[in-house]
Image: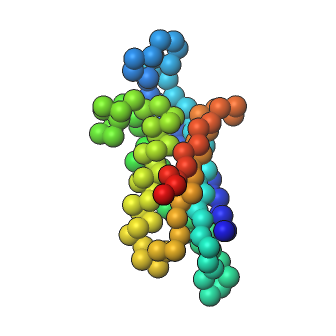
């Protein structure tokens, strides 16, 4: 199994609903996102996925979240914009972007890791079948 990981970042504000503590108040983060793609096969160039392609998928998954108030986005109006929910949302969005590219049908996203600060992160992994 080959894994390729790319990283990007976005800035956004949020507040955690039904939370007691500082995070119930509006605040922001500079989130760092790592996305890992996996496959068992290589293409004719000997690549699993081109880094440019992987970066593009991650960038498109982040685009909607960057410089927003996450609580106002449709995805988080009923779902708390916790780091866990953001990770799952981005994973599914990136999966949809990947599915649009037939030439990448052999590629899967294995995990996404979102760093809320330099010391705290959440990892969302592909569900095993």
Q: Quadrant of the N terminus?
A: bottom right
Q: Nearer the viewer, residue 129 or 26?
A: 129
Q: In the rendered image, which quarter is residue 97 located in?
A: bottom left
Residue 91 appearing in the image: yes
Q: Please provide percent x and percent y for residue 93.
A: 41, 54
Give the residue displayed 49% in from the left and 61% down from the top: 57
Q: Is residue 109 left or right of residue 93?
A: right
Give the residue displayed 30% in from the left and 31% down from the top: 78
Q: Residue furthest bottom?
A: 44
Give the residue displayed 41% in from the left and 67% down from the top: 99
Q: Please provide percent x and percent y for residue 25.
A: 45, 16
Say if 85 sits above or below 97 in the image: above
Q: In the rendered image, which quarter is residue 124 located in?
A: top right
Q: Nearer the viewer, residue 106 or 96?
A: 106
Q: Is residue 30 left or right of residue 104?
A: right
Say if 111 sits above or below 45 in the image: above
User: What sort of colour scheme is used for the picture?
Assistant: rainbow
Q: Nearer the viewer, residue 69 or 33?
A: 33
Say if 58 sits above or below 50 in the image: above
Q: Please provide percent x and percent y for residue 94.
A: 45, 57
Residue 61 appearing in the image: no
Say if 28 sits above or below 68 in the image: above
Q: Residue furthest front?
A: 129
Q: Residue furthest top?
A: 20
């Amino acid at each position: 199994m080959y894994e390729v990981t790319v990283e990007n970042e976005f800035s956004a504000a949020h507040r955690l609903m039904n939370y007691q503590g500082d995070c119930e108040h509006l605040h922001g983060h500079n989130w760092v996102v790592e996305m890992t793609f996996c496959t068992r096969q290589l293409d004719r160039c000997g690549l699993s996925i081109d880094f440019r392609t992987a970066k593009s998928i991650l960038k498109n998954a982040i685009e909607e979240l960057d410089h927003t108030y996450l609580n106002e986005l449709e995805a988080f109006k009923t779902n708390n914009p916790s780091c866990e929910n953001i990770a799952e949302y981005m994973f599914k969005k990136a999966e949809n972007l990947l599915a649009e590219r037939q030439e990448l049908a052999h590629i899967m996203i294995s995990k996404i890791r979102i760093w809320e600060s330099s010391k705290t992160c959440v990892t969302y992994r592909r569900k095993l079948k």
